[in-house]
Image (cartoon, rainbow, N blue to C red):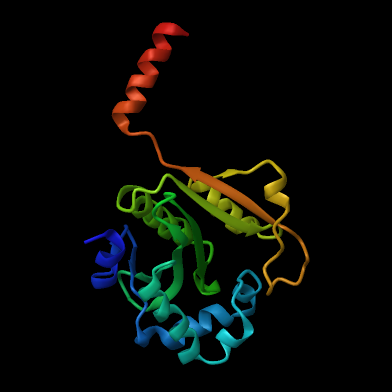
């Protein structure tokens, strides 16, 4: 069974110190809708207007993705209390190319607690170790320094070329500013890092 079919049959649950990342369920519909349609969150997303008409429609959008698995969407919940407080995703998953794009959103009540960074790091680990991705990309608006800080804490580097300034802003943003593009490649295995360091000590 290939990995995509395996994930269709058993979507994973990921855990970190404070968080659990799991499949989005119908019971999350209201919390999901409230989170995504919050004006502070909405302006940084690319959802089409029709998708945000009512909770059941938005949930159906996410639920449909568990069949195609082009995008892997995880509900973010706190271990101690449960209940969806955000979404963390690996979007545009291309197994053959070994790449995907990181996305995340969090209800404003839970901002500035390090939760977005914790969720992102957990999903990145899954992406590199389980999905065997070679590269994970990410984007954020130029007027969203908090999201940029999350990416930098996760080890992402800004793409310093034309690609980084050629992407249009999110539809909900309205600022017309371009998006910043970031990139993160698979970490070197520990043994390979040791070998490279040893070689550098000898020859440099």
Residue 198 x/y as whole percent: 35, 15
Q: What residue do we see at 24% from left, 72% from top?
A: 9
Q: Residue furthest left?
A: 1
Comparing 147 with 186, the one in front is 186
Comparing 6 with 75, the one in front is 6
Comparing 110 with 196, the one in front is 196
Q: Residue furthest right?
A: 176
Q: What residue do we see at 36% from left, 26% from top?
A: 193
Whether residue 106 is visible to the viewer of this picture, yes or no, is: yes
Total number of numbered labels? 0
Whether residue 12 is visible to the viewer of this picture, yes or no, is: no
Residue 152 x/y as whole percent: 55, 46
Say left or right for 133 vs 9.
right
Say left or right for 195 vs 29.
left
Say left or right for 40 vs 55.
right
Residue 1 x/y as whole percent: 21, 61
Q: What residue do we see at 39% from left, 19% from top?
A: 197
Q: What residue do we see at 37% from left, 71% from top?
A: 77
Residue 37 x/y as whole percent: 58, 82
Quarter of the rendering containing residue 6: bottom left
């Amino acid at each position: 069974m290939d990995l995509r079919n395996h994930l269709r049959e058993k979507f994973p649950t990921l855990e970190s110190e404070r968080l659990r990342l799991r499949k989005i369920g119908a019971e999350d519909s209201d919390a999901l809708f409230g989170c995504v349609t919050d004006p502070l969150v909405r302006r940084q997303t690319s959802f089409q207007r029709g998708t945000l008409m009512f909770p059941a429609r938005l949930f159906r959008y996410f639920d449909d993705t568990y069949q195609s698995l082009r995008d892997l969407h995880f509900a973010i919940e706190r271990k101690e209390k449960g209940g969806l407080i955000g979404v963390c995703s690996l979007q545009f998953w291309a197994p053959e190319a070994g790449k995907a794009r990181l996305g995340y959103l969090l209800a404003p009540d839970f901002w500035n607690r390090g939760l977005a960074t914790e969720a992102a790091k957990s999903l990145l680990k899954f992406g590199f170790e389980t999905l065997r991705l070679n590269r994970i990309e990410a984007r954020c608006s130029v007027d969203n320094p908090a999201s940029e800080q999350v990416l930098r804490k996760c080890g992402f580097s800004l793409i310093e070329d034309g690609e980084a300034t050629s992407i249009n802003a999110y539809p909900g943003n309205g600022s017309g500013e371009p998006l910043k593009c970031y990139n993160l490649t698979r970490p070197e295995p520990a043994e390979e890092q040791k070998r490279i360091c040893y070689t550098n000590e000898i020859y440099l």
